[in-house]
Image (cartoon, helix red, strand yellow):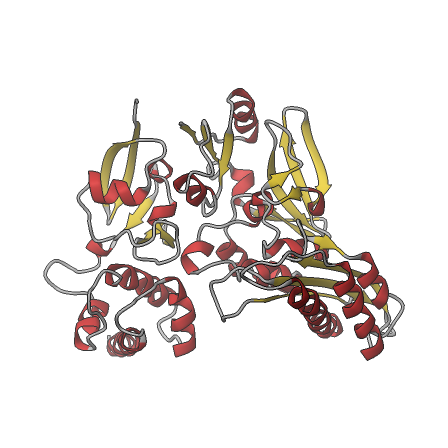
Amino acid sequence: MAGIHVTTTINGDTVEYVCQPDETLLDVLRDRLGLTGAKEGCGTGDCGACSVTLDGRLVCSCLVLGAEAEGRAIATVEGLADGETLHPLQRKFLEHAALQCGVCTPGFLVAAKALLDRNLNPTESEVRYWLAGNLCRCTGYDKIVRAVLDTAAEMRESRNAA
Amino acid sequence: MQFAAPDSLDKAVKLLKKLGTTRIVAGGTDLLVQMKSGFAAPDLIVDIKRIDEARQITEEAGGFRIGAAVSCFEMGEHAGLRKAWPGVVEAARLIGSTQIQGRATIAGNLCNASPAADSVPALIAAGAIATVVGPKGRRDVPVETIATAPGKTSLAKGELVASILLPARPARGGDAYLRFIPRTEMDIAVVGAGVALALDGSGTCVKARVALGAVAARALLVDDAAKALIGTKVDADALAKLAAAASAACKPIDDKRGTKEFRIQVAGVLARRAAETALQRARG
């Protein structure tokens, strides 16, 4: 079957790929582009392990067709760190031990970044509601929520110091 | 399967007319799950997100026209829409997670034709109109005529919902939507209730619409429940009558989410509570 040629932007880089019409963006990222940060947990939009942003909007990449990405801007967990320097969220997840098996972690990081990009002073309740679409079966969520709140506090401080 | 992303409604209609089984992808949050589980195997998928008209919220006749590809999240970001129809926006913002709301649309919620669709009772209560575009042109129909049964719509071959018009909010008007789920987030309505009402200068209810979800094969517009409010001050007696009428209108099924008896009772309770919130909003 003839594929669909797509030109898009991923983590700031122009990327081209050919995909099938029914192929999800998640499958394109993982299987065609080698970007395996986004994980397939459920494949039905319930678990958030495949979270990416599409034109700045947090989405489940398992519920996006690869063909839909033409001309859009995608951000994945691979774009979070600045070279060898971890994003504050990544650092705080490590400090707070906010991960165990780690399968949900890329999705949580992408989702939490989308929250902090909009609101650098979220309440605990806002963090919990925002992350309700990211499931974690290891941590019990508490350490994740604390890591996100601590990141927000640190980023506010460094912003104020600047 | 083929994929197309036309840049106009005309092109979309021509594509939809041509092939056998066709599906629209707006948010894709229902369609992709159905494809994955084998419930849908379209010959053609038409992405409507490149069509300007489908991507915008525009003011029209004092109300708002919401394009079929506008996400629920974008509705929540629109201050004017939130102010005019808070019940519709809160219903849209109850659907799924942040990720789902970044994609899901109320037109998709309507056309997916689930009896438990959260935004549909709120839209029906608000008197929303669906603009349907197809091979024979455009037609405007009340949203309650779109779904006919679970997963079935009144749309003909080649037709799609292009946008949904929320009318001007009446003077001293208010609306609200409530649903019952066994947890606080990320679940499917066991019962949903949408109420929109308007008061005159003396605080008497002059207009009301009450709609229920998940208690019948499709969302119900319950005239008897509205009549219980009209002409009253929406006092305890009127609210009790509204609750009784809402319960009486239910034709629910028993399933894992709730029994018939439970749904019938909760429909009355939720309709009353939604009416109380709508009343507060109408009083300003």
Residue positioned 84% across, 73% down in the render: B238
Front position in the image: B219 or B205? B219
Considering every residue shown, the one lying at the far right of the view is B231
Q: Is residue B101 above or below residue B204?
A: above
Drawn side of residue A146 relative to residue B178, left or right: left
Residue A7 visible, this orientation: yes
Whether residue A149 is visible, yes or no, is no
Residue A159 location in percent, x, y? Answer: 27, 74
Q: Kindly identify the residue that appears in the image at 25 percent across and 52 percent down.
A: A38
- Position of the C terminus of chain A, as image quadrant, is bottom left
Residue B225: % across, % down = 80, 63
Question: What residue is at 39 percent from the left and 53 percent from the top?
Answer: A45
Q: Quarter holding the N terminus of chain A? A: top left
Q: Is residue B119 left or right of residue A42?
A: right
Residue B63 image offset from top left, x and y in percent: 69, 53
Residue B176 sits in which quadrant? bottom right
Q: Residue A101's image quarter?
A: bottom left
Residue at the far left: name it.
Answer: A84
